[in-house]
């Protein structure tokens, strides 16, 4: 299934900016995306097996590193302690990685605790309205919370821990502790969450598997890590992870261990949970959707195509929808039985 090769960046308009300001997402950052482009050299970053990760570790002049260490540890403190630096003096920037692959060309900052060598990451990216809407909808409608801040054309995001989906399929499915039934169940729920909120391009390397040991077994949660394709594509199936060839292994697991009745049960369970989250955060959700309905996130051709395909799926008219925001509102109402 072909997805749009190069999605354009959409600016944050005034209405969305005011929404973000009201909800504490706008702040002044000491280091911006453009500052990190001042690197002087770089080398490929390899994983533990010596394979190319598609990331490049970049190098900076000594005086620049000193400046970045103070600024980037403060940015990390914004994500973790609301800017309280009294807990951050023992942290330092260990590495800065840059990814040429992908739409957002992100920087990944590795922060290390010098007392115990524990490390964490966060990301610095170019601001894109599609991604911002995706992050906010993830915060409101999913079981996950994610922190991010914006300063002009710079977006910072906290790291989402977990095993990348493609690596999980390649390696973890062969371990003795792997539970095929539980990953199949979670994938069905993840598939439903993505479709309900129209988050596209959930190929296996755009989500991670969070593993939680249980008293008798393991629990899994699939979490999206890429939100660029929020309400952008025209084809309905682009919003259903089950149709990407990269996810074929886990789709086979679902076929092996589930009956159609079981799949419908889990889909229904997830729709009920999404509706409860919506009901809890209606005020915030409606303000966000009002921004989305007055924004341009896709082309007219894609909007018309998605309207046509969702009409066939829901057997209900989408003629009143003028943009992706209108489509998402009606789609959610039909999916979740919202009045």
Image (spheres, grey):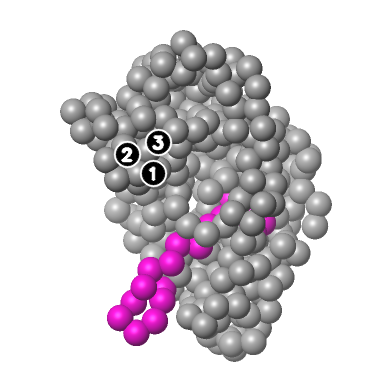
Tell me which residue sits at (73%, 47%) in the image.
Answer: 234
Q: Position of residue 12 (x, y in %)?
A: 53, 24
Quarter placement of the C terminus:
bottom left
Q: Which residue is mark 2?
A: 113
Q: Magenta stretch: give its range.
A: 198-219
Q: Are marks 1 and 3 in contact (CB under 8 Å)?
A: yes
Q: Residue at x 37, y 38 (%)?
A: 112
Q: Quadrant of residue 151?
A: top left
Q: CA distance from mark 2 to mark 3?
A: 7 Å
Image position of 91 (left or right of 238): left
Q: Which mark is residue 215?
A: none
Which residue occupies the extreme top position in the image? 63
Is residue 29 positioned above or below 111 on the image? above
The residue positioned farthest toward the right in the image shown: 2
Quadrant assignment for the N terminus: bottom right
Q: Circles 2 and 3: CB distance less than 8 Å? A: yes
Return the residue nearer the eye: 211 or 274. Answer: 211
Local secondary structure at mark 1: strand
């Amino acid at each position: 299934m072909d997805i749009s090769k190069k999605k354009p960046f959409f600016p944050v308009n005034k209405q969305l900016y005011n929404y973000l300001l009201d909800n504490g997402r706008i702040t002044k950052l000491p280091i911006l995306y453009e500052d990190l482009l001042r690197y002087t050299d770089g080398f490929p970053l390899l994983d533990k097996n010596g394979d190319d990760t598609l990331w490049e570790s970049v190098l900076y002049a000594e005086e620049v590193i000193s400046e970045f260490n103070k600024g980037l540890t403060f940015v990390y403190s914004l994500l973790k302690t609301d800017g309280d630096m009294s807990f951050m003096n023992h942290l330092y920037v260990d590495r800065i990685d840059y990814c040429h692959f992908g739409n957002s060309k992100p920087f990944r900052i590795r922060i290390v605790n010098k007392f115990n060598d524990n490390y964490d990451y966060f990301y610095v990216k170019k601001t894109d309205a599609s991604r911002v809407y995706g992050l906010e909808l993830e915060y409101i409608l999913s079981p996950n919370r994610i922190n991010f801040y914006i300063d002009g054309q710079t977006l910072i995001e906290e790291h989402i821990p977990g095993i990348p989906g493609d690596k999980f399929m390649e390696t973890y499915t062969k371990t003795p502790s792997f539970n095929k039934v539980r990953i199949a169940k979670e994938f069905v729920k993840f598939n439903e969450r993505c479709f309900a909120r129209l988050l596209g391009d959930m190929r296996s390397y755009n989500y991670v598997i969070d593993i939680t040991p249980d008293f008798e077994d393991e629990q899994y949660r699939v979490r999206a890590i890429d939100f660029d394709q929020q309400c952008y594509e025209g084809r309905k199936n682009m919003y259903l992870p089950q149709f990407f060839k990269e996810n074929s292994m886990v789709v086979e697991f679902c076929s092996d261990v589930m009956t159609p009745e079981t799949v419908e049960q889990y889909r229904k369970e997830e729709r009920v949970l999404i509706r409860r989250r919506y009901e809890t955060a209606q005020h915030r959700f409606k303000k966000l959707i009002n921004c989305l309905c007055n924004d341009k996130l896709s082309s007219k051709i894609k909007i018309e195509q998605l309207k046509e395909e969702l009409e066939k799926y829901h057997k209900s008219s989408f003629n009143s929808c003028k943009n992706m925001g209108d489509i998402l509102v009606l789609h959610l109402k039909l999916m979740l039985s919202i009045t």
